[in-house]
Image (cartoon, rainbow, N blue to C red):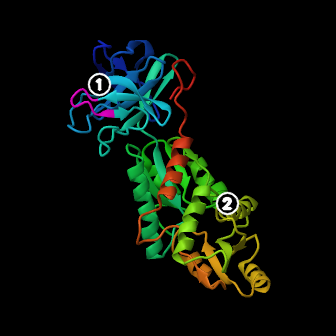
Amino acid sequence: MNSTAVLTGPAVAHASVASPDGPWTRVCRYDDLDPVWGVAALVASGTQVALFRLQNGNVYATSNVDPKTGAMVLSRGLVGEKRVEGETVPTIASPLHKDVFDLRTGRCFTSPELRLPIWRARVDGGDVSVAPPAAMLAVSHGTSDEHGRTAVLGLVEAVRAAVPGAPVHGGFVDVQQPDVPAALATADADAIVVPLLLATGYHVKHDIARDVDAHTASHAAVTRALGPDPRLASVLALRLAEVDWSPARDALVLIVAGSSDTEATRDGIIAGELLAELLRVPVAVGALAGAGAPMSEVVARIRAEHPDRRLVGVSYLLAPGYFQSVAESAGTDVTTRPLLTPDEPAAPELVAIVKERYLGALPPRRPHGSPSAA
C-alpha cells in the first residue's frame, strides 16, 4: 500500500497519513467522517475508495468509481436504506443517475447488470482503515479428466459471477496446478479458502489446513466443505429424475468416495439421510474407498433384500473423473451423473453454497467503537 492516503470530499479538508498493516491502509480518523457526506480516499496505485459513515455508526467502503459511467463520484452519492426481504439494507445512490447499490454486497437494485466493488472497512482505536475485498480461493481435489476439469471450472466461473467485487481464484489439492500454496501466493490479499469437496475429511483438515497455516504473507482462513447440505440433496433429486427414478420400482444407494476420516464418513451418512428425508424413501450409503460400508457389501445386501427392484446408484461425487468411473461400475443397474457436468451450468444450489461459505467466513461488520470493526 502507498504510505499516504489523500482524502477528498466535504467532510475532510486535510490529508491523512496512511499506515499499511498487511492489506489494510489507515485512511483517517473516525470523527473526520460526517454521517451525511461520503469521503473519497486515494489508497493505492491510484485506486479511489469511497467511505461512508452511517447514522448507526457503521462504516462502509466501496470503489469510488461509478459502475455505469466510470466517473470518480460515488463518495458524493446519497446514503439511504431499503427494505429487502424483511431486512433493512444500507444503500448508496449514484449522484449521476440514481442507481441504488447495496453498501454491503455491491448489488444494484435498479440495474441488476451493474455491480459496485466493495472494500472492507474497520474502525480501530478511532482510526478508519480499508482493505481490498478478501479473495476467495475455491479449492477442488483436481483431476486428469478433461470433463471433470471443465465441470469444476464452470462452477468457479459461476461463483465468480455471483460474488462481484471479490477476487475468485481456483486451486487444487492434487493433480492440477496451481496447488494451494501457489494460489495463496498469487492472491495478493487476505483469502478465504472454500474447499470444493463434499465432506470435511483429510484434505480439508490436514492438506489444506497445513498449507494455510504455512502461509504467512497475508491472513487466510478455511471454511467447511460443501456438504452435507440439504441443497445438495435437491441437486441429487434432479439427477435421479434424469434416470426416471421411481420409488415404487427402485432401491437407492448413495455412492460416496469414502475416507479414512471419521467426520468425513459421518458426513456421507448425513448426506444419505438428507436425501432420504427429501424423497421419503430409504437410502443406503456405500463407500468406494476408506471407511464406511463398502459398496460391494451394500449392493449385495440390497440385492438380497430386494431382488425385484432396480438398484440405482446416486453419485455423490462432485464431477466426472476416476471415482465417477468406479461408481458406474460398482454393481448398480444405473448410476446418476455427478453433481457437476461439463455440458450444463453449475446448479444454482451449488453456487449458493460456495458463496455462503465465503461470506460466512468474512468477519461481521460491527458498529464504530468495537475493537475489530470491519
Report if residue 338 is visible in the image. Answer: no
Q: Quadrant of residue 316?
A: bottom right
- Quote the CA–CA distance across marks 2 and 1: 47 Å
Residue type indicated by callout 2: Leu
**Front-most of 306 and 374?**
306
Main SS of the magenta part reads: loop
Find residue 77 and name its label. Answer: 1
User: In the visual, does 229 lie left or right of 38?
Assistant: right
Q: Position of residue 348 (x, y in %)?
A: 47, 57
Residue pointed to by mark 2: 274
User: In the visual, does 14 lie left or right of 134?
Assistant: left
Magenta region includes residue 97: yes
**Front-most of 341 and 165?**
341
The structure residue drawn at horizontal position 69% and vertical position 60%, both measured from the top left corner, is 267
Report if residue 58 is visible in the image. Answer: yes
Query: Where does the magenta region start and end?
Result: 94-100
